[in-house]
Amino acid sequence: GDSVTQMEGPVTLSEEAFLTINCTYTATGYPSLFWYVQYPGEGLQLLLKATKADDKGSNKGFEATYRKETTSFHLEKGSVQVSDSAVYFCALRNNQGGKLIFGQGTELSVKP
Amino acid sequence: SAVISQKPSRDICQRGTSLTIQCQVDSQVTMMFWYRQQPGQSLTLIATANQGSEATYESGFVIDKFPISRPNLTFSTLTVSNMSPEDSSIYLCSVEGGGPAEAFFGQGTRLTVV
């Protein structure tokens, strides 16, 4: 079945460091891909998305490119801030209207 | 977008008791979803709740343990019945809307069973 695998956390970075959180997926067909963020004590919020191959999703300085050839959707940010500390979830939905499938989440901690 | 309010935000319950979690949406939606997030793990879909029909449960989840109500297009409840410590999790309500396949989530209910 469909699945999402993320790099394990926690990831600890200093402010202004470069961030990469790896995400790979297994799916039939051409899923839509998402990154969700969960700030402490809050629910999940959509960070960015891509619905077809080679699309790049971006928001708040974060980017991720839908790479069909490597079945990946890695999250990147050039310069992280303390306020980016959160848990990040990669997810997919099969375009046949199936349910959202989440990765296990990666906790990011940014130190000043 | 949709604004989703869940309550309670957290609770500590005795084993063998039941807790009902409420989810209120600020707009009418066809489907509402309930997820479980166990400690240190990802989100798992429990069930999909449509207004006017019985909820559809995912493999591993049953109505007797997680009864769901969906009385109208803006409200749903999830009950965690006969709780055990293994039920300690965050429970999240979700709806879909906006762009293709996007989902919106409530802030979650952090449940601890002692």
Image (tube, helix red, strand yellow):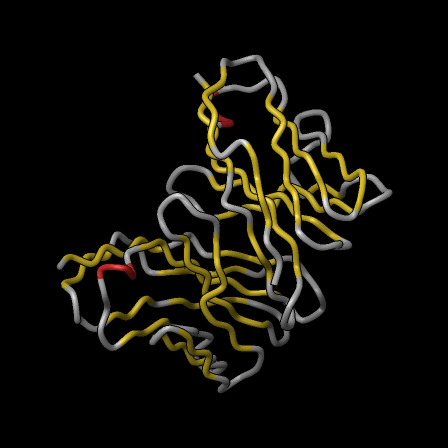
Q: How many marks?
A: 0
Residue placed furthest toward the front: B26
A9 sits to left or right of A71: left
Q: Position of residue B106 (x, y in %)?
A: 55, 47
Q: Position of residue A101 (x, y in %)?
A: 55, 57
Residue placed furthest toward the bottom: A54
Above or below B87: residue B52: below
Instruction: Give the quadrant of residue A17.
Output: bottom left
Instruction: Give the quadrant of residue A19.
Output: bottom left
A54 sits to left or right of B70: left
Q: The C terminus of chain B is located in which quarter? A: top left
Residue placed furthest toward the right: B52
Q: Position of residue B11 (x, y in %)?
A: 47, 25
Above or below B68: residue A5: below
Q: Residue at x 60, y 60 (%)?
A: B103
Q: Residue at x 59, y 23 (%)?
A: B19
Q: Residue at x 41, y 75 (%)?
A: A59
Q: Residue at x 34, y 76 (%)?
A: A61
Q: Position of residue B71 (x, y in %)?
A: 80, 38
A73 sits to left or right of B106: left
Q: The N terminus of chain B is located in which quarter? A: bottom right
